[in-house]
Amino acid sequence: MPLQRFRPDNFTLTLLATVILASLLPCRGEAARVFDGITDAAIALLFFLHGAKLPRTAIVQGIAHWRLHLTVLAGTFVLFPLFGLALRPLGHALLTPELYLGVLFVCALPSTVQSSIAFTSIAGGNVSAAVVSASMSNLIGIVLTPLLVGVLLASHGAIGISWRGVLDIVLQLMLPFVLGHLARRWIGDFVDRHKPLLGFTDQGTILLVVYTAFSAAVVEGLWRNTPVSALLCTLAVCALLLGLVMTTIRWIARRLGFRRKDEIAIVFCGSKKSMASGIPMARILFAGQLGGLGALVLPLMIFHQLQLMVCAVVARRYAAQGDHPVAQDSREAD
């Protein structure tokens, strides 16, 4: 049915329920400190498992299709930030300062992994290239995203990201990722056989971070200081941002002469943003501003759902044009 493709998935509904729970029953005091410790451990486990999941061959294969991967990385880490800055007048006019900073944060994040691959497959694109591009984007983003966030916030006149924040990202995200990848020779088969475990860790970590972030934000008066009109405008700005990027990156892929299968991989890998990486990064980078973290991650939550709905429609259109059998789409929490 036409309306089913726009139906929120179960994880999105759970995410909304978590926001409601944090709004009604926020954790405070000692309970908040306990949740913080659990969340830090879950984030480390998440990136350890992601490192264990990435095959060494995927890194080696990345060198072979370098034009495609550079195009995806340019879309993710250049095109998005440029559009985010271009939307500044609109952001100032329609959004609260925290929500617009959240939009800029979205622009600095790496691409998704699972859903980029799933939509590329549905559309009949180059799946192997999508696997490598999405994985490379997340690996590079661990280091590049904090630097980009610092540049974007500085251009906005907001508080910058210190080198301490970059070091924390390396220690809390990159180190577990590298250790997980080094451990792949011993645990790789187990991780490959138990992929739902990684999905559960992805989603559980996001829910923990969202609950603790929104709890702190609610205590600081998030909903008192954020009008409903600003939330609706955030939805509109995120939709405009996604539309601009998808249209532009498809035009770039065609201008550069990529074949259709490669164009599909570029469009889906280069136009999406990872919530699984983004929310843990936000927690670390904005650790000194937890009162405002809820508003900062709201645009990411909105953008995440939008990209899933829009990409589901675009993937089916690509598939119909190319006579490719449409597979069931996967709405992963990345």
Image: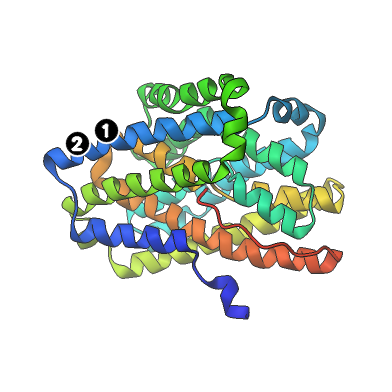
Q: Is residue 169 above or below residue 271?
A: above
Looking at the image, which residue is at 41% across and 30% down?
44
* Residue 89 point in image, percent of width and height: 45, 57
Look at the image and tell me whether residue 286 can be seen.
no
Tell whether label 2 touches label 1 (CB within 8 Å): yes
Spatial distance from mark 1 to mark 2, Cα to Cα? 6 Å
| Numbered mark located on residue 33 in the image | 2
**Left or right side of 27 for 310:** right
Report the front residue among 189 and 92: 189
Looking at the image, which residue is at 77% across and 29% down?
61
* Residue 18 point in image, percent of width and height: 32, 57
Residue position for label 1: 37
Q: Amino acid at mark 1?
A: Gly
Looking at the image, which residue is at 14% across and 45% down?
28
**Left or right side of 105 for 69:** right
* Residue 271 point in image, percent of width and height: 63, 51
Look at the image and tell me whether residue 168 can be seen.
yes
Could you tell me which secondary element the residue under label 1 belongs to?
A: helix
Which quarter of the rendered picture does the N terminus lie within?
Answer: bottom right
